[in-house]
Image (cartoon, helix red, strand yellow):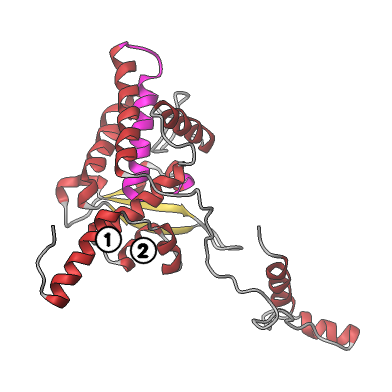
Amino acid sequence: MTPPHQILKGFCGYVSHPSYDWADVCLERFGAAPAQICHPWNTFAHLAEFEARPTRRPFGYDELEAFFAQADERAHDLLEGRKKGALPALRDAQFFKTVYAFGLRRREAVMLDLNDLRPNPYVPEWGAYAKVQVRYGKAMRGSPPRRRTVLACPEFAWASEGLRYWVEEVRPRLAPATDALWVSARRTRMTTRTVDHRFAQIREAAGLDPALTLHSLRHSYVTHLVEFGYAAQFVQEQVGHNHSSTTAIYTSVGDDFKNRIFQEALRRVLGEGETA
């Protein structure tokens, strides 16, 4: 919830902005002009762009493996039994893998079209599945959705291959009536409500912590890129954060990563070998 002083600050900034003629109109009618009354010395500082709840966290590696294994198993069982819902189950499994492997927000993923899949000349073997053009990124207040291009990273090449299988083999069997990348059994674009429902089903079937949400996959992406050694600026650009502080909040590296970095520092500074 936006603090009241932030709302008042925004209003005062609007009515006193030189781009508008409110000041001239007020001087003419009332003999006084509006001014900003909220300053650093009389308001609380907004410490971070994103202030997450303590329960919001990324998946652990074991949890991530269990979640994707459950999604794959669900699709496999439906296919083996030739039951209704097999194709949507395959879609769900690949949808969540794509969200994780490209660090997407829920709406960003749902709103993808086929034309948003792009090649990367540096990895021609990945074909049209080496980049994702996000057109519905989180917008700043009063601004249209932000766009960005997300590169597929080598560590997640398996997801790009799965995306290829979905687009070329599975999706056509649903006879979609739209260019949407993720389509429902009714041949229309999948909704965010459906995505949330399917995520909860898989999470519960896998016996995972109810605190884990679909957005936790994005947290996991940020955390794992950092653990893989990618530069902070690269990670920030991939996920579309305005500030590096937001990316830092998303990051929750594991003990193994911290121990490795600490041991590298020991070798670099003290010339000591790796401890047992």
Which segment is the magenta one? 81-107
Report the side of 82 relative to 13 (left or right): left
Residue that mark 1 sits on: 258
- Which amino acid, by three-letter code, is at mark 2? Glu
Q: Are marks 1 and 2 in contact (CB under 8 Å)?
A: no
- Compared to residue 25, the image places residue 243 above or below, namely above
- Where the C terminus falls, by quadrant? bottom left
Report the side of 100 relative to 49 (left or right): left
The first of marks 1 and 2 along the sequence is 2
**Residue 61 at x, y = what percent?**
30, 43
Visible residue check, residue 175: no
Residue placed farthest to the front in the image?
Answer: 276
The question of residue 102 being in magenta is answered with yes
At a point 31% along the width and 64% down the height, the residue shown is 234
* Label 1 environment density (alpha carbons within 10 Å; few <14, some 14–19, many ≥20): few
**Residue 19 at x, y = what percent?**
67, 80
From the image, state whether disc 1 or disc 2 is nearer to you: 1
**Residue 36 at x, y = what percent?**
72, 81
At a point 68% along the width and 82% down the height, the residue shown is 39
Q: Which mark is residue 237?
A: 2
Q: Nearer the viewer, residue 122 or 235?
A: 235
